[in-house]
Amino acid sequence: MPVRKIPKNYRNVTGVHASDKSIGDAQFESTLERDFLTLLEFHPDVERFEVQPRVICWEDANGKQRKHTPDVLVLFKPDLKLTPWLCEVKYRSDIFENWPQYKPKFKAGIRHAKTIGWRYRLITEVEVRTPYLANCRFLTGFKFQKPKVQDIELLLGRLKHIGQSTPMELLASIDRDRYAQAHLMPTLWHLIATHQIDVDLYQDLTMQSVIWSKS
């Protein structure tokens, strides 16, 4: 669970992100944090993540005890053998404007991460606000749906037979009727959102995007 409770803040958007990868509640206190959690939720390399996993205690130049609570711990799938990330999520303008204040705190985070074999990372809007994020936002509403099994099997079976297609071509190959295609479309987006159907999410996701079967 988060080591501190995120208060309501009239300056930022706060809330809890819907997640099946989060260890505890996926709370956020800015739209940038929310968007970063969206990326983690969808990225296939991410196994789990935890918001505000621990408090780092450190001493400033005047000998005063300070505390730093990084925003997110990211754990990758074991078979990838990637070093966990201990992340601080901030806007670049905030970092530049408050660098003298943040620098010793970030250095404390780097030292702490090294002692336990993690990597400390600063995450800004440059890494977060990408076409990948736009696709993830679109797919969020479909990920947690529960489509009919027969619709899933129909789409997966046809795509496996074809090998490679587009959403438009795949639906048309199953049924030329527009209403029948509209019925299957949410299930198709669900299969993409849950990585049962592959697509390049680093490109704009459209009805003409190339999709292919995972198996």
Image (cartoon, rainbow, N blue to C red):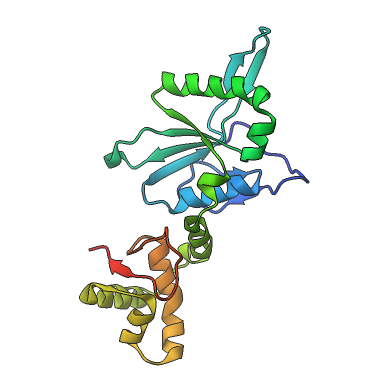
- Image quadrant where one finds the C terminus: bottom left
View extreme (bottom): residue: 177
Which residue is drawn at the image coordinates 43% and 70% (left, top)? 189
Is 169 in front, or is 75? 169
Q: Position of residue 31 (x, y in %)?
A: 64, 49
Q: Residue at x 46, y 65 (%)?
A: 204
**Residue extending furthest top?**
63
Is 172 or 1 nearer to us in this picture? 172
Pinpoint residue 170: horizontal percent, then vertical percent.
Answer: 33, 79
Placement of the N terminus among the 4 image quadrants: top right
Q: Is residue 8 above or below residue 154?
A: above
Answer above or below: position of 130 versus 171: above
Report x, y in % for residue 39: 48, 51
At a point 47% along the width and 48% down the height, the residue shown is 40
Q: Foreground: 31 or 41?
A: 31
Number of marks in the rendered image:
0
Query: Residue 7's image quarter?
Result: top right
Q: Residue at x 53, y 32 (%)?
A: 53
36 vs 130, nearest the viewer: 130
The quadrant in which residue 84 appears is: top left
In the rendered image, residue 96, in percent from the top left (x then y), is placed at 65, 33
Instruction: Answer whether residue 44 is visible to the viewer in this image.
Output: yes
Is residue 147 visible from the viewing direction of this image?
Answer: no
- Above or below residue 200? Residue 161 is below
Is 73 placed left or right of 89 in the picture? left
Drawn side of residue 54 relative to residue 30, left or right: left
